[in-house]
Image: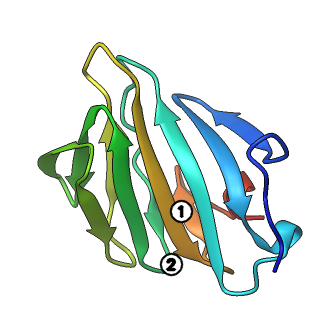
Amino acid sequence: MPIIRSTDAPTFTMGHATFTGFAAPSRGAKETCVWRTRLQPGAAPAEHSFSNEEVLVAVAGAAVASLDGVEHHIAAGDAVIVPAGTLFSLANPHGEPFEAIVALPVGAVAYMGGEELVPPPAR
């Protein structure tokens, strides 16, 4: 079984967030991608959707999750299940960073700003 050391995990920055890639096809995963998302204080939302279900588990801080335009305040220990095709965003209006662990099936495609893409931490 491959072990992904935190010191070896690639980091990607996209706009308002930093992503640390753990499980992905390029790192040996066959079925599930997992990464850590970190939103800096004051981060604005970036609306997107996925072709498959996305699951987030908040591990630090607090954020506002929007699912199809309905806002939900979340904090460490909460989980968010985002159904496939749901417009989703996270914002961090708070003074401390927000962190979540995210899981998504291998092969899922993101739709953001009229573009299709595979998120870098899921490659």
Q: Which of the 4 image quadrants contains residue 54?
A: bottom left
Numbered mark located on residue 51 in the image: 2
State whether residue 31 is above or below residue 28: below
User: Left of 42 or right of it: where is 99?
Assistant: right
State the image coordinates of residue 103 (x, y, percent, origin top left): 51, 68
Would you name the residue on which mark 1 appears? 111
Q: Earlier in the sequence, mark 1 or mark 2?
A: 2
Q: Does dot 2 land on a helix, a strand or a loop?
A: loop
Given contact means CB atoms under 8 Å apart, are the residues at marks 1 and 2 in contact? yes
State whether residue 116 is above or below residue 121: below
Q: CA distance from mark 1 to mark 2?
A: 8 Å
Q: Amino acid at mark 1?
A: Tyr
Residue toward you, 7 or 104: 7
User: Left of 15 or right of it: where is 94?
Assistant: left
User: Left of 99 or right of it: where is 10?
Assistant: right
State the image coordinates of residue 52 (x, y, percent, origin top left): 48, 80
In the picture as drawn, the residue positioned furthest to the bottom comes out as 31
- Model colouring: rainbow
Residue toward you, 6 or 107: 6
Q: Which of the 4 image quadrants contains residue 55?
A: bottom left
Q: Amino acid at mark 2?
A: Ser
Q: Which of the 4 image quadrants contains residue 1?
A: bottom right
